[in-house]
Amino acid sequence: MQTSELQQTNQEAKGKDSGRRVFSGIQPSGDVQLGNYLGAIKGWVERQAEKTNFFCIVDLHALTVGQDPEELRQQTRSLAAMLFAAGLNPDKCTVFIQSHVPAHAEACWLLNCVTPIGWLERMTQYKDKSANQERVSAGLLDYPVLMAGDILLYDTHEVPVGEDQRQHVELTRDIAARFNHLYGETFVIPEAVIAEVGARVMGLNDPNMKMSKSFSHVRGHAVRILDDPKEIERSFKRAVTDSGNEIRFSDDPEKAGVNNLLGIYKVITAKGNAEVEADFADARGYGDLKVRVAEVVINELTPIRQRYMEFMDDVGELDRMLARGAEQAAAVSVPKVDEIKSRMGLVLP
Ligand code: AMP
Ligand code: TRP
């Protein structure tokens, strides 16, 4: 099928306004944890039918820090299964693996040539990840340009991400504007969409530190999506709180632990702050709070874990779903990368 034809049938199949494009990415490194789920994946699932959505498993980004090849392969498939298990539906949105669509690596190179190095050296994520490292790959510095390529290839309007990625989306806007200025209107200037609730789930062992996949092996830090109910309950029971007994939302760093637990409960139950606090009015101390929060988390994650197992048992089906996603993604990004090349003066074959 011709790519333009495929594009058309996709849009028809979706039968919705394809005017607004949404793109987001998630790395297949480390175990997916509650912060990823509440800060990113859950929102994707809830809004997948509204606009034209592209969700990308960014395996090329994962390579910017050392990866064990077998582990990376396993984690990439596992993440795909997780996304489908969490409810992303290939009839409603496009889910694909970044390296399956070579236009992404190509766009990165092309955009590299219009991006000043100084812009990259200023990125806080780069500074954090490169600090105290003996050797830093050129890929790590270039990471945000690859991300800019991901976003710009799809004429993306909205980029739903966690707060930590805001700076990279700002950089994407700068790169797009610079390219448009140098070569004429080519790119839509995208916007970061940061979810208000769930934007920052904190570590259970240290509520002043973001819950992160990179620390999911640290005891008591993260709740992994695939943890069994017993483990989840244990992690919550160990959660750090404070020496008081007040169960309420608060900006006080002292109460960051309780605030985090209430925040998790709030996103899952989709209740307002007052309603959440009212739910705990009869709680007997923090012990009770922890058990009840664990319970809503367990109820949310159990069906996902079950569906995940089913997908991992039928990898053939999973691979077919991913191949379909890559085809849909390429239908949009291949013509776009050709447009970029052409603007820059490359001779198209
Ligand atoms: P990463 O784990 O860095 O690949 O992140 C994948 C997505 O999950 C991004 O949109 C992140 O901003 C989001 N995310 C990661 N950790 C958290 C967290 N603790 N709270 C909220 N969102 C998060
Ligand atoms: N850098 C993002 C993260 O670590 C992942 C990512 C890669 C992404 N490409 C993207 C997010 C494009 C949004 C859009 O979370």
Image (cartoon, rainbow, N blue to C red):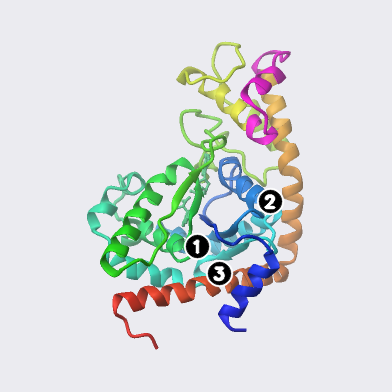
**Res 329 label:** 3
- Asked whether the beta carbons under mark 2 and mark 3 sit within 8 Å of each other, the answer is no
- Ligand 2 contact, mark 3 (Cβ < 8 Å): no
Q: Which residue is depicted at the point 64% across and 70% down?
A: 10
- Horizontal and vertical percent position of residue 64: 40, 59
- Horizontal and vertical percent position of residue 63: 43, 61
> Which of the 4 quarters of the picture holds residue 190?
bottom left
In front: label 2 or label 3: 3
Is residue 175 something one can see in this rendering?
Answer: yes
In the image, residue 275 lies in the stretch drawn in magenta: yes
Q: Callout 3: helix, strand or loop?
A: helix
**Residue annotated with mark 2:** 86
The kind of secondary structure the magenta stretch mainly shows is helix
Label 1 vs 2, first from the N-terminus: 1
Could you tell me the amino acid type at mark 2? Ala
Label 1 packing within 10 angstroms: few (<14), some (14-19), many (20+): many
* Relative vertical location of residue 255 with respect to residue 306 in this rendering, above or below: above
- Span highlighted in magenta in the image: 265-286
